[in-house]
Image (spheres, rainbow, N blue to C red):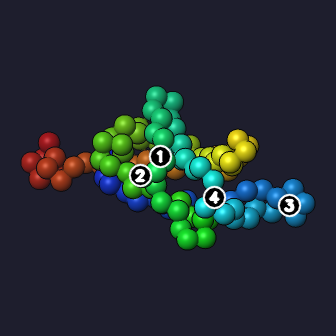
Amino acid sequence: MRRYTTPTLTLLAQVYDEQTDTYGPIDLTTYRVWVSIEQPHSQLEFADPTMELTEDGTLVTLRLTQEQTARLCIGTAEVQINWMMSDGTRGATDIGRLVIDRNLLGEVREYGA
């Protein structure tokens, strides 16, 4: 992902199954869902309406604004999908990594700054 852009991120919601020793998708359509993107000095939280689930509930789509990407530093960010069931039970995916690259705005490149 590049800073100062408006990326769309699609994340696969999957959890570890101890019985089969594999990861598999989880259907989040009936849960309250939010996504966290964190770095040492920045944290972004996404929930409705800035986030969408696919029909089967296994893919989460986030649309970031330029302001949100500008808050992230060049380097690596941690990403996690979280959910809460109607009975209050919470769950989360393993923490994933997202690489943030540098991006100079078109205006900066045009004027040679």
Residue 91 on image: x %, y %: 70, 46
Q: Residues within 10 Å of mark 1 (few under 14, many from 20)?
A: some
**Which of the two discs, 3 and 4, labels the residue nearer the N terminus?**
3
In the rendering, at what x and y percent does residue 15 appear? 73, 56
**Pointer 4 with pointer 1, Cβ within 8 A:** no
Disc 2 vs disc 3: Cβ atoms closer than 8 Å?
no
The foreground one among 110 and 32 is 32
**Residue tagged by mark 3?**
21
Disc 3 versus disc 4: nearer the observer: 4
Alpha carbon separation for disc pair 2 and 1 = 6 Å
Say which quadrant the C terminus sits in: top left
Instruction: Answer with mark 2 or mark 3, whichever residue precedes in sequence.
Output: 3
Query: Of the residues shown, which amino acid type is indicated by label 2?
Result: Thr
Left or right relative to 26: residue 4: left
Quick one: label 3 or label 1, which is nearer the N terminus? 3
Of the image marks 4 and 1, the number of the one nearer the N terminus = 4
First of labels 4, 2 by sequence position: 4
Q: Which residue is mark 4?
A: 30
The quadrant of the rendering that contains the N terminus is bottom left
Name the mark on residue 50: 2
Horizontal side of 77 relative to 1 (left or right) equals: right
Are the residues at dot 4 and dot 2 in contact (C-beta closer than 8 Å)? no
Q: Nearer the viewer, residue 18 or 58?
A: 58
> Residue 6: x and y, percent?
32, 54
Disc 4 to disc 2, C-alpha distance: 17 Å
Give the amino acid type for the residue marked by disc 4 in the picture: Thr
- Residue occupied by mark 1: 46
* CA gap, disc 2 and disc 3: 33 Å
The amino acid type, in three-letter code, at marker 3 is Asp
Residue contact at pointers 2 and 1, CB within 8 angstroms: yes
Instruction: Name the mark nearer the viewer: 3 or 1.
Output: 1
